[in-house]
């Protein structure tokens, strides 16, 4: 079936480095994508979103890139901090009845100082 | 988690007992959802609501029921809890269908 997945289950970086977390999607009909951050023991937290009419969107220290040609989504975190350590996962709107968003399984980002 | 309150935060119960989880929102969003999160499965939709008394099933609805009597409240009931329902349950809200979800802090449910 169609699903959203992530390339790597874990990513370890040093404090101050830039982090890139990737996500591949297979539903070419999806037109809206979201990145979430989930810290241990907490609910997923919205980070940034992007619609399919855009290729790039920037937030505070985060940038999301969308490549519709290869169905690829990435989250870039600049100057990664220990507080960025969490599980990150992407989501896409499924355009399917009964399923609001399809979630990937997540990448665990570990930041060492 | 602002604007979304889940209760209880933790619950331990025995197999066969009924359990009700509560979600309360102060954002006046139309859509409310219940998800469960399990290792290796990610977030899976149990039920959702698109208005007062308007609910529908998600992908893992067996063994669960929901009710929404007010815009701000969405209840998830396990009529007879089983060990396979041990999980972390998240309530979420959104302004529109297919739009970004905002999640509560979760309920850790253990069925012994």
Image (spheres, coloured by chain):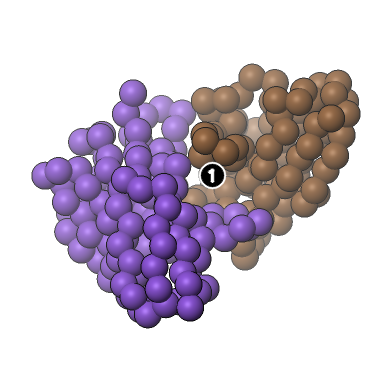
Chain colours: A purple, B brown
Q: Is residue A73 above or below residue B64?
A: below
Q: Is residue B59 left or right of residue A102?
A: right
Q: Is residue A25 visible?
A: yes
Q: Position of residue B63 (x, y in %)?
A: 70, 21
In this figure, what is the number of numbered marks? 1
Q: Position of residue B69 (x, y in %)?
A: 72, 39
Q: In the image shown, does B91 or B52 lie closer to the viewer? A: B91
Q: Callout 1 environment at 10 Å: few (<14), some (14 to 19), or many (20+)?
A: many
Residue at the left extreme, as displayed: A69
Q: Residue at x 25, y 66 (%)?
A: A57
Q: Residue at x 68, y 37 (%)?
A: B87
Report the chain holding disc 1. Answer: B
What residue is shown with label 1?
B31
Q: Residue at x 73, y 39 (%)?
A: B75
Residue A5: name its quadrant.
top left
Which corner quadrant holds the N terminus of chain A?
Answer: top left
Q: Position of residue A30 (x, y in %)?
A: 27, 40
Q: Is residue A60 visible?
A: no
Q: Is residue B109 above or below residue A79?
A: above
Q: In the image shown, does A40 or B35 lie closer to the viewer? A: A40
Q: Is residue B102 left or right of residue A11?
A: right
């Amino acid at each position: 079936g169609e699903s959203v997945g992530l390339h790597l289950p874990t990513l370890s970086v040093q404090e101050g480095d830039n982090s890139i977390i990737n996500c591949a999607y297979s539903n070419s009909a999806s037109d809206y994508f979201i990145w979430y951050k989930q810290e241990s023991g907490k609910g997923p937290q919205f980070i940034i979103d992007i619609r399919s009419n855009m290729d790039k969107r920037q937030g505070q220290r985060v940038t999301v890139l969308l490549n519709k040609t290869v169905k690829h989504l990435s989250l870039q975190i600049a100057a990664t901090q220990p507080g960025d350590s969490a599980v990150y996962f992407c989501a896409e709107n499924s355009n399917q009845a009964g399923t609001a968003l399809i979630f990937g399984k997540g990448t665990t980002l570990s930041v060492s100082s | 988690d602002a604007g979304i309150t889940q209760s209880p935060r933790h619950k331990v119960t025995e197999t066969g007992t009924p359990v009700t989880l509560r979600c309360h929102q102060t954002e006046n969003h139309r859509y409310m959802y219940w998800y469960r999160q399990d290792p290796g499965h990610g977030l899976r939709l149990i039920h959702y609501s698109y208005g007062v008394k308007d609910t529908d099933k998600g992908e893992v609805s067996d063994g669960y029921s929901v009710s929404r009597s007010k815009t701000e409240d969405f209840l998830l009931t396990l009529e007879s809890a089983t060990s396979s329902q041990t999980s972390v349950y998240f309530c979420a809200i959104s302004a529109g269908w297919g739009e970004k979800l905002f999640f509560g802090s979760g309920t850790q449910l253990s069925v012994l």
